[in-house]
Image: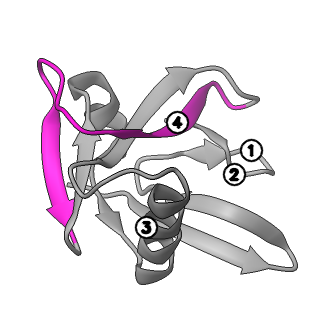
Amino acid sequence: MITISEKALQKVLSLKKESNLDDSYGLRVSITGGGCSGLSYHLDFDNEPKAGDHVFEDKGLKIFVDMKSLLYLVGTELDFSDGLNGKGFHFINPNASRTCGCGESFAV
């Protein structure tokens, strides 16, 4: 399962509103190869699960994750920071053995 912090939820809802997306849209979280640590996080909006997706719901938000990405993301929390030391979404991933300095890629 993947969870979302209250701060990240508010940012996602704000971005959905800016993009004129209705309540049928949720957040797609996936992993792609790349980045300085080998694997990168990817976020997007989606309104339909694809074949093999797992769909979670946290705080009323649907979260779509493909099976391959789920293997790397089980237990992860999505957070958002707007502080001086970095602005953006952050993944608190208990499966990551190391992360890069920017926090956008990781290794297991």
User: Which residue range is magenta in the image?
Assistant: 37-58
Please name whichever residue, 26 or 54, is drawn nearer the observer in this view of the structure: 26
* Residue at the disc numbered 4: 42
| Residues packed near mark 2 inside 10 Å, few (<14), some (14 to 19) or many (20 plus) | some
Q: Is residue 55 above or below residue 9?
A: above
| Residues packed near mark 1 inside 10 Å, few (<14), some (14 to 19) or many (20 plus) | some
Could you tell me which residue is drawn at 68 percent across and 62 percent down? 88
Could you tell me which residue is drawn at 41 percent across and 82 percent down? 6
The percent coordinates of residue 58 (x first, y second) are: 21, 68
The numbered dot on residue 103 is: 2
Q: Secondary structure at mark 1?
A: loop
The alpha-carbon separation of the residues under discs 1 and 4 comes to 15 Å
Amino acid bearing label 1: Cys
The percent coordinates of residue 2 (x first, y second) are: 28, 56
The alpha-carbon separation of the residues under discs 4 and 3 comes to 17 Å
Q: Closer to the camera: disc 1 or disc 4?
A: 4
Q: Is residue 2 magenta?
A: no
* Residue at the disc numbered 1: 100
Q: Secondary structure at mark 2?
A: loop
The residue most toward the right is: 84
Amino acid bearing label 3: Leu
